[in-house]
Image (cartoon, rainbow, N blue to C red):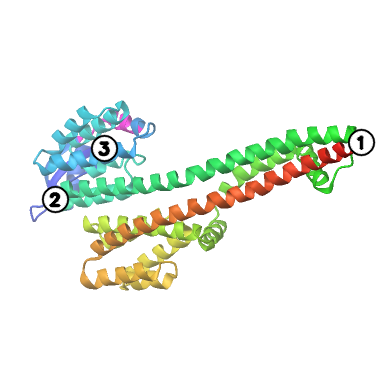
Amino acid sequence: MPTFAYQARTQQGKKVFGTVEAVSEHSLADQLKREGYFITSIKATDAHSHQASLRVSSGGRVGAAQLSLFYFQLGNMLEAGVPLLASLKAVQKQSTKQFFKQVVLMLATQVEQGVRFSDALTRYPRIFPELYRAMIQVGETSGNLDLVLKQVAELNERNEKLRHEIFSALAYPVVLVCASIAVVTFMIVWIVPSFSAIFLRAGVPLPLPTRLLYGFSMWVKSNVWFLAVAAIAFGFGAPFLLRFEKFKYGWDRFWLSVPIVGQLISQIEISLWARNVALMHASGVPILKTLEMTGKLAGNLPFQRVLIQARVRVQAGEKLGETIKEGGIFPPDIVQMVLTGEQSGNLDKMLYKAALFYDELLTRTLKQLTSAIEPIFIVFMGIVVGFIMISVLLPIFDMLKLF
């Protein structure tokens, strides 16, 4: 069925437009008239353009920095009075990435055909998330698209900065653990058996630590395929089990109970939620829609359940602060800030302050975590390596006694 872009006015004179599928232009016109609209124009969208947009949305990657720049440039030009279509074409010419140039070109083509900007973005869900599209749609309706685009740019940049801080803080411990495991595995599988074989041939009785390590080494070598299969099974099986809600809930609940790690997860979830709600609410997105979308974005299932339940209860007329308080996951300070924001009518400002505050807490927690992991891991690896060295050196001392 062909797709048509239409522009019309309501009986009150308000301008409306959109993209729908219809049998023909005349059937769409009849439908709009029956609904009480005065038609301004109806155009058939380019099928080739639509297919091309689908191909563009199915491949390629766009960096967070490039997207933030796109939103910011577009918002600045709209604020200066440049029409949306001209702004898109200008941004398209300035883009240095060929793939993103194609995306912006397709957006400009759709807008030129009468498609709403927010509707055009829905054809690229991997590039433009639903949360941002909802904010832009409200900005179009309210006439504040320039302001909303700047808010989207800020939200995208802050969220990406948060992800980068987490990755940077945890990258060193992860690399340290992997390298240490590789070194210990090499020593157990290759070094220890070689020395143990020399001692056995020399007739030197092996001390208890050496016998234990040698037995473990032989077990690893004889079961190497079993261990490899088990590792692969765990690598594929764990993500599969996490698809089941009960298993994922228990897994997420466990990590929330771990000292420092639980604080880190909680601060990440609260920071992201508070900032997303603050900027969406400030841009004019209805609170129920905001809670629905931000609830879906929560990565931790206990948090997600609390937020979903909060939306249901807010819809029933309850206050947001009371609903998240009874969930038992949000700390008292964030609950009190939400309640104060609701009472004063400044919920978006309060949540934005909360997001900034939890960003600072998150930075401190990351430093505590990394500073705690390093010495603990060094001590643990020192014990492991020390045990291996003792197991190798004790038989050498016994051999020296024979001579």
Q: Nearer the viewer, mark 3 or mark 2?
A: 2
Q: Amino acid at mark 1?
A: Gly
Q: Which residue is mark 3?
A: 3
Q: Is residue 26 left or right of residue 218?
A: left
**Residues drawn in magenta:** 44-54
- Residue drawn at x 63%, y 45% as measured from the top left: 234
The answer to which of 164 and 7 lies nearer the viewer is 164
The quadrant holding residue 285 is bottom left
The tag earlier along the polypeptide, 3 or 1, is 3
For label 2, count other residues whose C-alpha is less than 10 Å away and answer few (under 14), some (14-19) or many (20+): few
Give SS at disc 2.
Answer: loop
The residues bearing labels 2 and 1 have C-alpha atoms spaced at a distance of 89 Å
The answer to which of 377 and 34 lies nearer the viewer is 377
Q: Which residue is mark 2?
A: 143
On the image, the x and y values in percent for residue 249 come to 53, 60
- Residue drawn at x 26%, y 48% as measured from the top left: 154
The tag earlier along the polypeptide, 3 or 2, is 3
Q: Amino acid at mark 2?
A: Gly
Q: Which residue is mark 1?
A: 203
Give SS at disc 3.
Answer: strand
Quadrant that contains the C terminus:
top right
